[in-house]
Amino acid sequence: MIKIAVSGAAGRIGKTIYTTLIGSDKFEIVFGVDARGAGDLPYPVYRSFRDSILDADVVVDFSVPEATGELLAYCKEHKCGAVIATTGHTPEQLEAIHAASEKIPVFMASNMSLGVNLLTALAKDAAKFLDDGYDIEIIETHHNHKLDSPSGTALTLAKAINDVRGDALNFVYGRHAAKQRRSPDEIGIHAVRGGTVVGKHEVLFLGSGEVIRLCHESENKEVFAVGALRAAEFILGKSKGFYDMTSILGSFHAVTSVSSESDVVLVTLPSVTFDDFLALLGKLKRLHINLDMISQNYNADGTAAVSFTLGEADYRKAAHYISEHTSANIVRDACKLTAEGAGMEHKSGVAADVLSLLGKKGAKVYAITTSETKISCCIDSASLATAEKALKSYYGIK
């Protein structure tokens, strides 16, 4: 059983965590902390972490920023993880949280809903594809008990979009009494408070003659409790580090597609000057030949070892020019196997997993290239079917 301590135990989501875990065989709430007292909760609730003598594996925090200091002190003393879902921290409190992550595992997110974090990813993609001819506005709506404004999630959305735009956008919080035209280099952020709305976030991209609207609405508080518990399970056993929802999304969806290409030729030029390689590229360009999996490593003598792949048909057209490099090493009857997924950027060890699987299937790996979201391997053709099936099975891809 994973032992959980709940900070903000008597609050709305604190109580939701308790009801969510009724009958659970995975989690156990060992104690709670809340300055208001226990209320009707059936487990020990202290008014301060300093009063507790009980041990927890992870503290889940849905309280107030002012409680951050003693929460972190408890976690460091008891060597347990912290899942922080509270928003509205000061810069000093945020600095303390990041400093604590050098000693304990800290998971922090302004919104524990997986759906909201998917919304953030979609908003970033939209900001990449849409130019500055689209004005960006964010509207968040919450119940009338919410204290901070705008919401931490709205700020997270704005910062994520601004990161994509190279921090070129200014945040404008509402436009009360403003008598000037909207500037294209701003993100409008607006807060609505009322009723019992759990949480709604809209990101608008407003262009000439069209509006793109991305929206997420939470229907109950259980989604936040479930997300926080998933975060607690995620950091369990980790010694230290700072994590957020992208870490979880990455662990679930590190690889989302596996594809292959047969009849590939691998060419390696072990010692070539930059000018000679550039000349070869020019000749292949005139033949309308595209190269793939290009890699380069410098040699001690100033030359470079260069390798690349191309299709068999293109190789036959380019063979004359490639043969001018007498030391060229050619591997024919090869193929390319590619694993892709946005989650690779947030999950370590994907390349090791892919290569381990290929090794277990006896594949000969001639070359490998990687990017933030892609791993391409040039392997022997005889192993392609078995290796591709193994990768798809491992990552649950049909």
Image: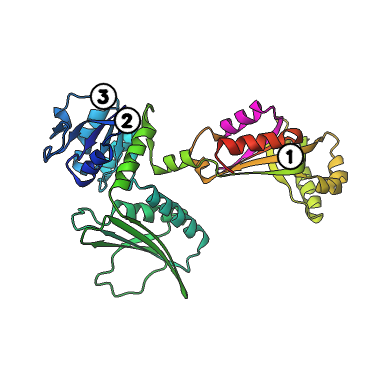
Q: Is residue 49 above or below residue 147?
A: above
Camera-nearest residue between 351 and 173: 351
**Coordinates of residue 29 in the picture (x, y in percent):** 24, 32
Q: CA distance from mark 3 to mark 1?
A: 52 Å
Q: Magenta part of the protein: which range?
A: 351-373
Q: How many marks?
A: 3
Q: Secondary structure at mark 3?
A: helix
Residue 16 x, y percent position in the rendering? 24, 43
Query: Is 267 left, or right, of 196 in this rendering?
Result: right
Residue at 77%, 48% (x, y): give it: 281
From where the camera sits, is residue 298 visible?
Answer: no
Q: Earlier in the sequence, mark 3 or mark 1?
A: 3
Badge 1 crowding class, 10 Å Cα cut-off, few under 14, some 14 to 19, many 20 or more, is many
C-alpha gap between disc 2 and disc 1: 47 Å
Give the mark nearer the N terminus: 3 vs 2.
2
- Mark carried by residue 25: 2
Indicate which label's residue lies in the foreground, 3 or 2. Answer: 2
214 relative to 226, above or below:
below
